[in-house]
Image (cartoon, rainbow, N blue to C red):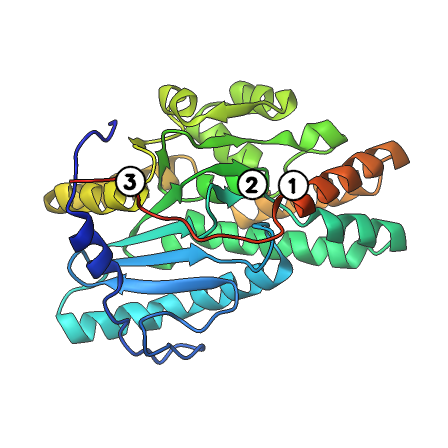
Amino acid sequence: MTFHGTIDIATARNSLRRPLLQSTAARPLGDAGVATYDNISLTIDPDIRTAWCHMNVPGKPIVTQSLLDDLRHMQDAMPDLNADFTAATGAPLTHFVFGSRTQGVYSLGGDLRMFVEAFGRGDRETIHHYARTCIDVVYQNINALDLPLITIGLVQGEALGGGFETALSFDMIIAERSSKMGLPEILFNLFPGMGAFSLLSRRLDAARAQKMIMSGRIYTAEELYDMGVVDVIAEDGCGEAAAADYIQRNASKFNAHRAIHQARRRVNPITRDELSDIVDCWTDAVFQLAEADIRKMTRLVAAQDRRFQKAVPPSMVGCVA
């Protein structure tokens, strides 16, 4: 379904600022309705029973070890938060939406600087630990955080490499029209090893997943919508409003929709062992890279550094009722 509707943006903004219920989770929650993580924010909209989580990584919008650690803490805290919400309102959360606060970027993917430095030291353990934490996060996403939720990846801008893998790990993807997604790892002689093949094989098939990975192509949101990878297209600047509108319009069908996602996971299960075996394969491949491949990676790191001297939060300008 392509999103063409409108929503009252003042209402959407206000709902996103509602206070987050106090939780007994591992991390304390701030008075302004934002969890006290360094790399993510977490807010609750009680009107649509939805948790909104946004990446807000200082500097470059990449997947750092610190971000991964925050995500694991948040995932572990969600059952308690859902229980508190249910006790306070009489009904559980129904949706979890995961986006980014960086203007024009969902995530550029893995921490290439860390890869280069660890490779130079011959430090396999650091790289392997990072990759294992990635699949811990992805596996929890795949299984809807072990909660009776529908999960949504909200892509506003670029989602590359591990960023695209993250979006794919949710039940649905809502993407703004100008968003671009892809798996460019082949350009420096590597492959996306934290779930891409498993996730794309289930959404498409193994042959098309392999073709996408080996091409290194960057796809538009509309191309991926036509392929069935993206579920909803939103107009630029309207991603959050489109997600809220989708949740509201389908509230009466939530039971059926969640059951369908459960059935899909049962028909095409992705096991922790599958993800772990692929990570081991990926780690081996990292330490088979040639110096020329590492130089390409280093040049990409430098280009990212120049681009993201300062991150700017996204706005909702242009999405009008």
Question: Which quadrant, please, contains the N terminus?
Answer: top left
Instruction: Tell me the tag on residue 278.
Output: 1
> Can residue 255 be spotted in the picture?
no
Residue highlighted by disc 3: 238
Instruction: Count neighbours of disc 2 (C-alpha within 10 A) and say few if under 14, some if 14 to 19, many if 20 or more.
Output: many
Q: Quadrant of residue 21?
A: bottom left
Point 28% across, 71% down: residue = 20
- Tags 1 and 2 touching, CB below 8 Å: yes
Is residue 220 left or right of 113 when viewed as pictured? left
> Can residue 316 be spotted in the picture?
yes
* Sequence order check, earlier mark of 1 and 2: 2
Is residue 290 left or right of 35 when viewed as pictured? right
Q: Residue 169 location, x and y as percent?
A: 45, 43
* Sequence order check, earlier mark of 3 and 1: 3
Point 30% across, 43% down: residue = 317
Whole-angstrom CA distance, mark 3 to mark 1, is 36 Å
Give SS at disc 1: helix
Residue highlighted by disc 2: 195
Instruction: Count neighbours of disc 3 (C-alpha within 10 A) and say few if under 14, some if 14 to 19, many if 20 or more.
Output: many
Point 20% across, 29% down: residue = 4
Q: Residue 34 location, x and y as percent?
A: 36, 69
Closer to us: mark 3 or mark 1?
A: 3
Query: What's the amino acid at mark 3?
Result: Cys
Whole-angstrom CA distance, mark 2 to mark 3, is 28 Å
Query: What's the amino acid at mark 2?
Result: Gly
Whole-angstrom CA distance, mark 1 to mark 2, is 8 Å
Q: Residue 149 location, x and y as percent?
A: 28, 53
Instruction: Count neighbours of disc 1 (C-alpha within 10 A) and say few if under 14, some if 14 to 19, many if 20 or more.
Output: some
